[in-house]
Amino acid sequence: MSRLFKAIIMGPPGSGKGTISSRIVRDFGLKHLSSGDLLRSQVSNQTEAGKEAKQYIGSGQLVPDVLMVRLILNELKPLNQNWLLDGFPRTVSQAESLSKQEEVSSVINLDVPFETIIQRLQGRWVHPGSGRVYNLEWNPPKEHGKDDVTGEPLIQRDDDKPETVRARLETYQKQTTPVLDYYREKGLLQEFQGTESDKIWPHVQKYLSERVAKD
Ligand code: G5P
Ligand code: MG
């Protein structure tokens, strides 16, 4: 049996991880697992983990490592297909815990300037069920306020308020940039710079097409 391709997508809040991930899923069939989507579904289902996570998410802080690691490693364990992890790891300690269970094949980093991001997040609308993301200016839904695929209502995320976005960017700078160094040193990091997902995407697509075996 061939070895599974286990990829991570990193980048600051609003850098386009969800946007690029859905194109990767479409073209390469990887199973997408977003730590943020997973947490938000725990919050809306009012699980114990969700109740604990809510306060951190709302203030733009990271959810404690123990909780996060448990949630993600449990999701990954049973997977027997190529996967793409979005939003995890976000601390060096999370990266070390992940390495004890999984052998990561590749880490994609979306290097998008902070100025670009603050603007974008104000116009973001999401479909909570699938994690599909829209932007009122850039990729609006076909019908205002409704998901293109299911027709269900779209929502705005609580943590997309400008003051929380600023806190999320600071948290990223302090706690997540060391994770980039961690993977750079292991020779796994591939960086993609730009301000537009449509221009970044062809480079990511080419990079993956040289690495992911087609079914
Ligand atoms: P999340 O959910 O992981 P973030 O902050 O890392 O949240 P986010 O906000 O989901 O990342 P993204 O996925 O990188 O951003 O970006 P996106 O949604 O694709 O694009 C953003 C917007 O820009 C969209 O409206 C999109 O349509 C638009 N867009 C995309 N490309 C372009 C473009 O080229 N041009 C324009 N104009 N627009 C574009 O984490 C949330 C919280 O959960 C907790 C933390 O509290 C975190 O703050 N959490 C964790 N805590 C601890 N450890 C972890 N591992 C955690 N993971 C999550
Ligand atoms: Mg996202």
Image (tube, rainbow, N blue to C red):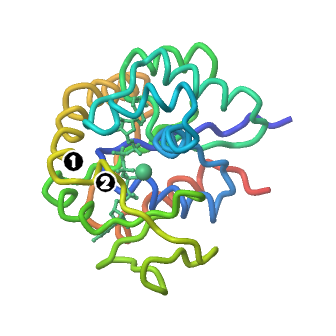
Decide: few, some or many residues near mark 2? Use Cα within 10 Å; few <14, some 14-19, many ≥20: many
Decide: few, some or many residues near mark 1? Use Cα within 10 Å; few <14, some 14-19, many ≥20: many
Q: Please give the name of the residue rendered at 80% of the width and 56% of the height, measured from the top-left corner.
A: 215
Side of 67 relative to 119 (left or right): right
**Percent of width and height locating residue 5:** 66, 40
Which residue is disc 2 drawn over? Answer: 14
Quadrant location of the N terminus in the rendered image = top right
Residue 171: quarter of image: top left
**Percent of width and height locating residue 82:** 69, 43
Which residue is disc 1 drawn over? Answer: 165
Q: Please give the name of the residue rendered at 48% of the width and 15% of the height, measured from the top-left corner.
A: 66
* Distance in Å between CA atoms under marks 1 and 2: 9 Å
- Of residue 37 and residue 182, the one placed in the foreground of this image is 37
Side of 163 relative to 136 (left or right): left
Mark 2 or mark 1, which is nearer the start of the sequence?
A: 2
Badge 1 residue CB within 8 Å of ligand 1: no
Q: Please give the name of the residue rendered at 67% of the width and 48% of the height, measured from the top-left corner.
A: 31
- Residue located farthest toward the bottom when viewing the structure as drawn: 143
- Of residue 150 and residue 35, the one placed in the foreground of this image is 150
Q: Nearer the viewer, mark 1 or mark 2?
A: 1
In the rendered image of this protein, does residue 92 appear above or below residue 80? above
Mark number displayed over residue 45 = none
Q: Amino acid at mark 2?
A: Gly
Element type at mark 1: helix
In the rendered image of this protein, does residue 184 appear above or below residue 60? above
Badge 2 residue CB within 8 Å of ligand 1: yes
